């Protein structure tokens, strides 16, 4: 199938989330182990620390819970992820749902209350604008089971 695909590093067991933890998903770890998954963490690639204050997308901005505008870091990280995708001629990505970077179709609503709204994370928007198919970890599992499961 696909030679390489982007995967959220937190899904591959890397402790890069805002809270310094991962959201390890076994099939994503398998893709990385097989040399198919290329790990990215757009927030770290954008220069944000781990752990870091949580951030949420508010329209075209990304604000930390403390009110700091971190849009520039999110945008830089998104384009770094795109550069990696283009370098490896990647057409697919499996990214972490709900994230202000990687969420697809649904993200936190910017109120830091745990509520959601319709929308995409910064990286997802950039990748989609450049023709890369983005799946969240649930969609990615269906795709994995179809093409890669042993």
Image (spheres, rainbow, N blue to C red):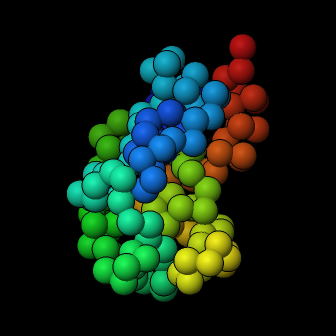
Figure check: 81 above or below 52: above
- The answer to whether residue 135 is left or right of residue 48 is right
**Observer-nearest residue: 23 or 100?**
23
Residue 111 position, x and y percent, is 56, 83
Looking at the rendered image, the quarter that the C terminus falls into is top right
Residue ranking furthest to the top: 150
Figure check: 28 above or below 104: above
Residue at horizontal 46 percent and vertical 62 percent from the top: 101
Residue at horizontal 65 percent and vertical 45 percent from the top: 137
- The answer to whether residue 69 is left or right of residue 103 is left
Count the marks. Answer: 0
Residue at horizontal 75 percent and vertical 29 percent from the top: 145
Instruction: Tell me if I can see residue 36 in this picture.
Output: no
**Looking at the rendering, which quadrant does residue 114 occupy?**
bottom right
Residue ranking furthest to the left: 47
Figure check: 125 above or below 32: below
Residue 78 position, x and y percent, is 36, 60
Residue 40 position, x and y percent, is 39, 43
**Observer-nearest residue: 57 or 115?**
115
Residue at horizontal 38 percent and vertical 66 percent from the top: 53
**Observer-nearest residue: 102 or 149?**
102
Looking at the rendered image, the quarter that the N terminus falls into is top right
**Looking at the rendering, which quadrant does residue 63 occupy?**
bottom left
Figure check: 45 above or below 56: above
């Amino acid at each position: 199938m696909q030679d390489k695909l982007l995967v959220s590093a937190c899904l591959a067991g890397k402790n890069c989330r805002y809270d310094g933890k991962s959201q390890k998903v076994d099939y994503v770890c398998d893709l990385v182990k097989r040399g198919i998954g290329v790990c990215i963490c757009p927030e770290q690639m954008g220069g944000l620390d781990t752990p870091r204050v949580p951030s949420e997308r508010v329209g075209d901005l990304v604000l930390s819970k403390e009110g700091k505008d971190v849009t520039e870091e999110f945008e830089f990280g998104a384009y770094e992820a795109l550069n990696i995708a283009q370098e490896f001629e990647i057409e697919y990505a499996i990214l972490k749902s709900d994230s202000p970077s990687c969420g697809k179709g649904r993200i936190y609503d910017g109120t830091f209350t745990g509520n959601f709204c319709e929308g995409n994370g910064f990286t997802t928007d950039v990748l989609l604008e450049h023709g890369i198919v983005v799946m969240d970890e649930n969609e990615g599992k269906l795709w994995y089971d179809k093409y890669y499961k042993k």
